[in-house]
Amino acid sequence: METTVTGYWDRKKEKIKQKFPGISDQDLFFYEGKEKEMMENLEYKLGISKLELAKIIEAL
């Protein structure tokens, strides 16, 4: 499952911060062309797999 950071990212990142208070704005800042690095960082910080993270983001 491939997750892309498109459309409504501002809304989704606010919901992620509510669900996971330890995640900062910097962790969720989307740099063009750096989506993979941001997602890997979130996976590491949350201690979850790529698939789990994709499911969480898609459900928001």
Image: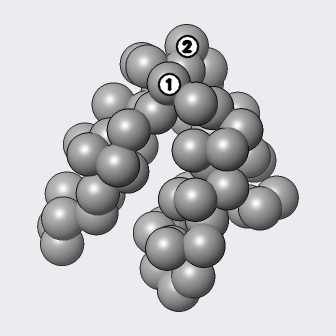
The residue depicted at 61 percent of the width and 65 percent of the height is 12
Choose top left, top right, bottom left or bottom right for residue 47: top right
Q: How far separated are the C-alphas under marks 2 and 1?
A: 12 Å
Mark 2 — residue?
Answer: 47
For label 1, the SS is loop
**Disc 2 or 1, which lies upstream in sequence?**
1
Neighbours of disc 1 within 10 Å: few (<14), some (14-19), many (20+): few
Residue shown at 18% from the left, 65% from the top: 31
Q: Position of residue 3 (x, y in %)?
A: 56, 60
Most extreme residue toward the bottom is 7
> Is 53 on the left or on the right of 38, as rendered?
right
Which residue in the protein does label 1 denote?
22
Figure check: 41 above or below 47: below
Pointers 2 and 1 in contact (CB under 8 A)? no
The percent position of residue 13, horizontal first and vertical second, equals 53, 59
* Residue at 28% over, 63% down: 30
Above or below, 43 against 32 in this view is above
> Which image quadrant is residue 39 in?
top left
Q: Amino acid at mark 1?
A: Gly
Q: Amino acid at mark 2?
A: Gly
Picture coordinates of residue 49 (x, y %)?
Answer: 60, 24
